[in-house]
Each structure stands twice: as structure tokens, then as C-alpha cells.
Image (cartoon, grey):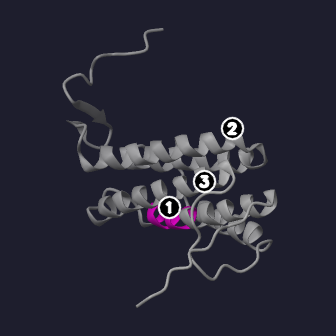
Amino acid sequence: MKWYTGRGDSGRTSLPSMGEIWKDEQIVDAIGDLDELNSLLGIVGSIYPRLKNELADIQADIFLISSEIAGFNMSFNDSFVTKIEKLIDNYGSTLPPITKFIFPGGHEASAFLHFARAVCRRAERKVVSLYKNGKAKDLHVRYLNRLSSLLFVLAVWVNYIEGVENVEWKGKSK
């Protein structure tokens, strides 16, 4: 098997929805952020097996979103958002209330979940731009919005379960 084609050497790529386009186009940028998010979730699943199955399921969802944005006709629907909401409720119900900002960090898996949350937010902003131009669905935006909430809850949960303090910011307003 040949692992490269050379077709992208000119700085262009091809998407079913747009044909050949420049690699710095907004749509390619959004798909790249989703790919980065998927990679981070893979890291977390590798270092924290307790979440591996849930994260693998989410990774498959992200591939669906990326595929739909690229122009493939997939089956992404409201049930995917509902699934994320149930995970938030399930993991969140085991946690004490959070009343202040939390510093990302603690357990290695928690730190990577916080990193994934930040990348998810960036991907969400890119997908919002696509949605405003009719190139993504409102469902994609809702899913990513919920996913960033889930990633925060999971980051807090990992520290809580592992007995690592979630350090609160003690900043004061003027």
C-alpha cells in the first residue's frame, strides 16, 4: 500500500461538497480542529481506560460530523446530542457543586480532558462560522456545545475519582 498520493502538495485538497479547494479554507480548518479533538480523545482513552468506551463512541460521532461537513450524507441526528446530555447528567450527578473557575490540571487524564475541551470550543467556533454560511447543521453546533460541557464534567470527575484536588481559582473582581 502506498501511504501518500502527492495530490495535496500544491496546497489544495478535495471535498465532495466543494470539489478541489485550498487547504486553508474555513471548512478544512474546521475539519482539522475536529481531527485534533479526536486525537486528544484518543490520548485520554489510552491513558485512562475507564473512559475508553465512551470516548471511542464520541470519536465516532466526531467522524460523522466531519463527514457531514465534508459533504457526505450521514445519519447524524438529535439522539447524538441526547446521548451526550445523558453522560453529562450521569457523571455530573456524582460530583460536588462547582462554584468557581477550575484550573486545568491534576490527574494526567483530567489535564488532557481540559485540553480537549478547549480544542472542542475552538472547533465549535469554526463550525458556527460554517453554520452561518449554510455549510454545517445547527445540530453539529449543539453537539459540540454539549460535548465541551461533558469534557469539563469528565475532567472534574477524573480528578474527583482519583482523589486529586480540583484547584479553584481564587481571583477577585475589582
The residue depicted at 80 percent of the width and 61 percent of the height is: 163
Which kind of residue does numbered mark 1 sit on?
Answer: Leu
Q: Is residue 23 visible?
A: yes
Q: Nearer the viewer, mark 3 or mark 2?
A: 3
**Residue 167, percent from left and from top:** 64, 68
Q: Pointer 1: residues within 10 angstroms few (<14), some, or many (20+)?
A: many
Mark 3 and mark 2: span between their CA atoms? 14 Å
Q: What range of the chain is rendered magenta?
A: 139-147
Neighbour tally class for label 3: few under 14, some 14-19, many 20 plus, Cα within 10 Å: some
**Pointer 3 or 2: first along the chain:** 2
Going from N to C along the chain, the mark reached first, 1 or 3, is 3
Residue matched to label 2: 46
Q: Which residue is mark 1?
A: 144
Foreground tag (1 vs 3) = 3
Residue labelled with disc 3: 111
Distance between the Cα atoms at labels 1 and 2? 22 Å
- Left or right, residue 82 beside residue 119: right
Q: Nearer the viewer, residue 145 or 137?
A: 145
Q: Main secondary structure of the magenta part?
A: helix
Q: Secondary structure at mark 3?
A: helix
- Tell us which disc is closer to us: 1 or 2: 2
